[in-house]
Amino acid sequence: MRHYTHILLLLICLLPCRLSAQVKDSDRLGMAINYFQDQQYHECLLILADLDKTYKLNPRFRAYLAVCHYYEWNFAEASKIFVAVLPQLQGLAPHEQSFYLFATAESLFYQDKFAEARPYYQQMMPLCYPNERGDAYYKIAFCLIREENYVEAYIALNQALTYYQQYRNTQDTQPRIRQIENMLYGCAEKMLTQIIAPTKTLNP
């Protein structure tokens, strides 16, 4: 009987410690969310990464963790988390989904994984605001150029130019607009080369 009493007393002593740890971790999660909302992504990352190791955070908080990695330029880790959680975030507001898709695409893009990045840029199109589509089409075109698909790249560049001129035709975006115009010219030259080259082979 004394043995059971001893165990019971031990459990009673440990219970407040466990409850205290749970309260502490919930407070830390609240701190992380505050950091995230204040765009203090490094501080948020430190807390969420530690909590994720212990509890395996839900998809929404893991998306926050991926965003923190993205803003810290940890693109490999960001893309790994985003790719895993995106299928579980379908119920979110369209623009929040579009941001996660864009951040996924960018994380892959900056790892030179252009073929993997392109579908995420494409998926964000119906979800994002019109003034954001120029950036997405520009990056899609860049991916297509790296894949040497100059016809589709030319089409995407035209789309990008249209959206920039209609929604973001400001002094700040003039360098990008001029760059797109130069890329259109370059794509046209590449397409012409691809058409002429086989003709030269057939008619030496």
Image (cartoon, grey):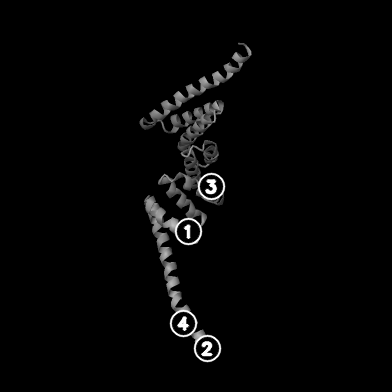
**Up-down: is 157 above or below 64?**
above
Q: Earlier in the sequence, mark 1 or mark 3?
A: 1
Indicate which label's residue lies in the foreground, 1 or 3. 1
Q: Residues within 10 Å of mark 2 (few under 14, many from 20)?
A: few
Q: CA distance from mark 4 to mark 3?
A: 47 Å
Residue 170's tag is none
Q: Position of residue 13 (x, y in %)?
A: 44, 78
**Residue at numbered disc 3:** 83
Q: Earlier in the sequence, mark 4 or mark 1?
A: 4
**Residue at numbered disc 2:** 1
Q: Position of residue 118 (x, y in %)?
A: 53, 37
**Residue at numbered disc 1:** 53
**Residue at numbered disc 4:** 9
Q: From this viewpoint, is residue 93 visible?
A: no
Q: Earlier in the sequence, mark 4 or mark 3?
A: 4
- Residue placed farthest to the top in the image? 204
- Residue placed farthest to the bottom in the image? 1
Tell me the amino acid under the disc marked 4: Leu
Q: CA distance from mark 1 to mark 3?
A: 18 Å
Q: Position of residue 184 (x, y in %)?
A: 48, 24
Tell me the amino acid under the disc marked 1: Lys
Residue at 37%, 54% (x, y): give it: 43
Q: Residues within 10 Å of mark 1 (few under 14, many from 20)?
A: few
Q: CA distance from mark 2 to mark 3?
A: 55 Å
**Up-down: is 132 above or below 87?**
above
Q: Earlier in the sequence, mark 4 or mark 2?
A: 2
Q: Earlier in the sequence, mark 2 or mark 3?
A: 2
